[in-house]
Image (tube, helix red, strand yellow):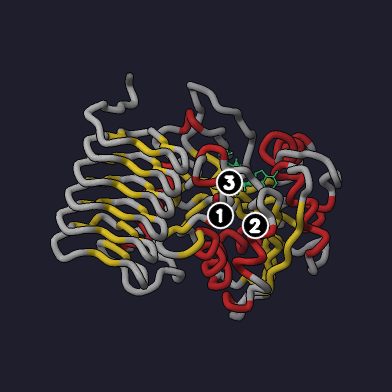
């Protein structure tokens, strides 16, 4: 049966503070992920799932989105852009973007956080929403450690009964996965021009009013790429094919070497690593599970694992980078060890040294 065309709002206005310094020069949804801007993975999946019109709710570095995606025709989508001068939060951003929607009050609108990689069956979520005539239907996922998130209990019928803040003793390990289907009229009831959080205000308010919020449970591939560790994991998972994405150029494999990059014969590049355009990995260098932005240079004998190497950064032979972020144009001299959790700011130069950097000193 042909599906009705759907509309979506993508929330992309956040500052992405947890991904600094990478997000100083570009917003999180535009960071290169498996060879394309992160949002390209969401846009291609949206088009595949029957979405035809997307409104991007922008604020931080707003102009960069239209430069990257234009009118959306290359994705088979029509894209509109809405701007918040002061970020209005998730609810305020959705409300602000809704003025560009074309559907009627009863129509479903898909809302996606702009930092989620999800392989779940979005059309099935929309079908459940329509079947139950819900105000909102949320994708819920189970995570091992729900204490880092708010948790979302449901009753036996799938009805969401509460939105609980982070707690050391969560009542369920189901969490809000950042993909919602709203009835259009519910969006229009959010106060306009105000800072509103859907998680803290809109959803608890709907439950309080006795309206129906449904939980759509599906434990497909799911990742919130908001931290550096998750960001490299997500990119590697797309390259390796663990998270299938129609936006991946070519077949899944151990590495993705973009046009204009060069990997020497004696170099080891594996674990879903992306080598950005103009980047060079010299012979005897080892790069695993990492993202090299454009024009980076990994010199002979350097070891880079689970890390993000910024544009134009240089890692000298003998340097070891593990689980770290190296800012654009930074230079890490021989003998430095940049350990898990550390971030080197753009243009910083670590001279060749025997001083060791460690997360626990
Ligand atoms: P951190 O600062 O690292 O927490 O990242 P973030 O700013 O992206 O915040 P968070 O991860 O909580 O945001 C979830 C999603 O909502 C992301 O896709 C953000 O781009 C988006 N978002 C957050 N705040 C706003 C806002 O005020 N307006 C709009 N339009 N989107 C927002």
The vertical placement of 140 against 123, above or below, is: above
- Residue wearing tag 1: 29
- Label located before the other in sequence (1 or 3): 1
Q: Residue at 71% across / 41% down in the picture?
A: 89
- Label located before the other in sequence (2 or 1): 2
Q: Which element carries disc 1, helix, strand or loop?
A: helix
Using the rendered image of the protein, determine whether residue 142 is visible from the camera's viewpoint.
no
Quarter the C terminus occupies: top left
Q: Residue 232, position in %: x, y? A: 38, 49
View extreme (front): residue: 351
The vertical placement of 128 against 247, above or below, is: above
Using the rendered image of the protein, determine whether residue 165 is visible from the camera's viewpoint.
yes
Q: Residue at 86% across / 47% down in the picture?
A: 192
- Residue wearing tag 2: 10
Question: Mark 1 vs ligand 1: CB under 8 Å?
Answer: yes
- Label located before the other in sequence (2 or 3): 2
Question: Mark 2 vs ligand 1: CB under 8 Å?
Answer: yes
Q: Residue 87, position in %: x, y? A: 74, 43
Front residue of 99 and 310: 310
Looking at the rendered structure, the number of numbered marks drawn on it comes to 3
Q: Which mark is residue 98?
A: none
- Residue wearing tag 3: 158
Q: How busy is the neighbourhood of tag 3: few (under 14 within 10 Å), some, or many (20 plus)?
A: some
Q: Residue 37, position in %: x, y? A: 51, 61
Q: Which mark is in front, 2 or 3?
A: 2
Do the residues under discs 2 and 1 have CB atoms within 8 angstroms? yes
147 with respect to 189 (left or right): left
Front residue of 65 and 283: 283
């Amino acid at each position: 049966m042909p599906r009705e065309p759907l509309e979506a709002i993508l929330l992309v206005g956040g500052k992405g503070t947890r991904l600094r310094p990478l997000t100083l020069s570009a917003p999180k949804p535009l960071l290169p992920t498996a060879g394309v801007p992160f949002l390209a993975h969401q846009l291609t999946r949206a088009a595949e799932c029957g979405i035809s019109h997307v409104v991007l709710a922008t604020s931080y570095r707003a102009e960069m989105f239209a430069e990257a995606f234009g009118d959306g025709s290359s994705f088979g989508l029509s894209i509109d852009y809405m701007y918040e001068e002061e970020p209005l939060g998730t609810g305020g951003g959705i409300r602000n973007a809704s003025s560009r929607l074309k559907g009627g009050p009863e129509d479903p609108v898909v809302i996606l956080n702009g930092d989620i990689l999800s392989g779940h069956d979005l059309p099935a979520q929309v079908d459940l929403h329509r079947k139950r005539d819900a105000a909102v239907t949320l994708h819920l996922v189970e995570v091992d450690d729900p204490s880092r998130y708010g948790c979302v209990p449901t009753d036996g019928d799938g009805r969401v009964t509460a939105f609980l803040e982070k707690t050391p003793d969560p009542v369920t390990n189901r969490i809000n996965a950042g993909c919602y289907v709203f009835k259009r009229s519910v969006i229009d009831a959010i106060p306009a021009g105000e800072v509103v959080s859907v998680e803290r205000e809109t959803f608890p308010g709907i439950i309080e009013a006795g309206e129906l919020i449904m939980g759509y449970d599906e434990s497909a591939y799911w990742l919130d790429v908001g931290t550096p560790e998750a960001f490299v994991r997500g990119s590697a998972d797309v390259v390796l094919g663990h998270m299938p994405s129609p936006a991946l150029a070519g077949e899944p494999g151990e590495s993705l070497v973009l046009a204009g990059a060069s990997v020497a014969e004696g170099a080891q590049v594996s674990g879903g690593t992306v080598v950005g355009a103009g980047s060079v990995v010299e012979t005897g260098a080892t790069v695993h599970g990492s993202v090299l932005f454009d024009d980076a240079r990994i010199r002979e004998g350097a070891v880079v694992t689970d890390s993000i190497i910024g544009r134009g950064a240089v890692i000298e032979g003998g340097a070891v980078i593990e689980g770290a972020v190296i800012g654009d144009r930074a230079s890490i001299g021989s003998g430095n060890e940049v350990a898990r959790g550390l971030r080197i700011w753009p243009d910083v130069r670590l001279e060749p040294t025997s001083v060791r950097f460690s997360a626990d000193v």
